[in-house]
Amino acid sequence: MRHVLEELLTSGDPPDHIGLAYETWAPVGSNGKVLDEERAKWLGKLTDISIAADYSRFFERWKATFQDPQDRIFELTLASRLLVGCGNASATDIGLMVHHTWGVPVIPGSALKGLLAHYVDTVYGPKDPALPPWTQPEDERLRADYQGNVWRERRIQRGPGAIYRILFGAPDAEEDAVMREKGLDAGASAGLVMFHDALYVPGSIPDEKPYATDVLTVHQKAYYDTSGEHWPNDYDNPNPVAFLTVRPGVKMLLGLSGPPDWTELAERLLRDALAKWGVGGKTNVGYGRLVAPNQLGPAVCSSSAAPSVARSGPRHQRGERVSVARVEDPSGKGKVKFRADDGFHGHFAGEEPPVVGVGQNVEVWIANVSPQGYTLTLRPPKGKKR
């Protein structure tokens, strides 16, 4: 057996399982990383690996298990690249999660549930999440039903609202007794909706080759390697890092189980979250967007490896009042950034931004609109009251 493995390793040909080839069979050097001079050739061989012919039979058997009246399945298509599991150990420093047995693209159900829970809390929750539901303004009482857990440092201070609790479940919290006194549900409970892993739909990409290479270029490698001791500068050499992603155009089958009324709501919200926010890594640069096939733009009609996001320009207009959520800076520079409900980012220019935490919402006005996003302001247009 050892002799056979040695021959496979020295042959230069990767195994047919993309996960095994990418994580275990990489031609690493003494530092445990793929050598720069071998990386392009090696990744080219990996992107040429086709899905096993027997996978289609497994897929049909798996799909046939969703026969219960409480089951709901639907297909979505990648409008941009997908990168799930980028924090996994990898010889390229950027991991990729695939199906353990078949090596096909997969999105864990836990990732879909986590995405939707955050989306529901951020988009539909109250403007001031610190206020208990019974002290919320009258027009915010309904939004409190969509609110997630409220944390006090590392402890859960208050459990979620009614709709959030039904969809995702709830833990025990410090204010459970107060919630019960107010006639609200409290305490630990399981959610009614089960989120299944999403699997690759066979035949959705030419030649059954769903993987493509992408490049992440680090411009200040010395700064990151020394934890900030070496200051950023203009003379460091860029350090391109190539890695694998799932290419646009791949179709994924998603599954939900639970009471029909609640799985219908979960599907509608999940479609919205996947189209606007995306799932997995690098979503701030457009990765992980899944949409219905009829929503795809002309750039995602083939197996092209170029990333694209199927969405139009910013929806809001100059002078319009909108609610935006504070988000992490996509550039990683720590700047104060916000995201509108159409998925486009905004920033404040010439004035101090409002002091809110990441994930919290604030109402602002649109000062200017560009194809890339919005310039925001706290100053209402002339003729409009603050």
Image: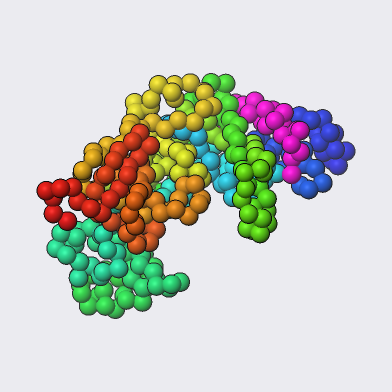
Q: Position of residue 43 (x, y in %)?
A: 67, 32
Residue 141 visible in this rendered orientation of the protein:
yes
Residue 160: quadrant of the picture: bottom left
Q: Toward the viewer: 36 or 167?
A: 36
Residue 133 is left or right of residue 303, and the answer is left
Return the x and y of residue 41 as percentages of the image width and height: 72, 28
Describe residue 264's horizontal placement relative to residue 13 as left or right: left
In the rendering, at what x and y percent does residue 229 appear? 66, 59
Magenta-highlighted residues: 33-59
The residue at the point 32 percent across, 42 percent down is: 374
Residue 57 seen in the figure: no
- Which of 152/328 is in front? 328
Q: Quadrant of residue 386?
A: bottom left
Q: Quadrant of residue 14?
A: top right
Q: Nearer the viewer, residue 281 or 366?
A: 366
312 with respect to 11 (left or right): left
Please identify the residue farthest to the right as the structure is shown: 3
Is 41 located above or below residue 337 in the figure? above
Residue at 18% across, 47% down? 381
Most common secondary structure along the magenta stretch: helix
- In the image, residue 266 lies at what x, y percent? 32, 47
Image quarter in which the N terminus is found: top right
9 or 340, nearer to the observer:
340
Residue appearing at x 48%, y 21% in the figure? 302
- 38 is within the stretch colored magenta: yes
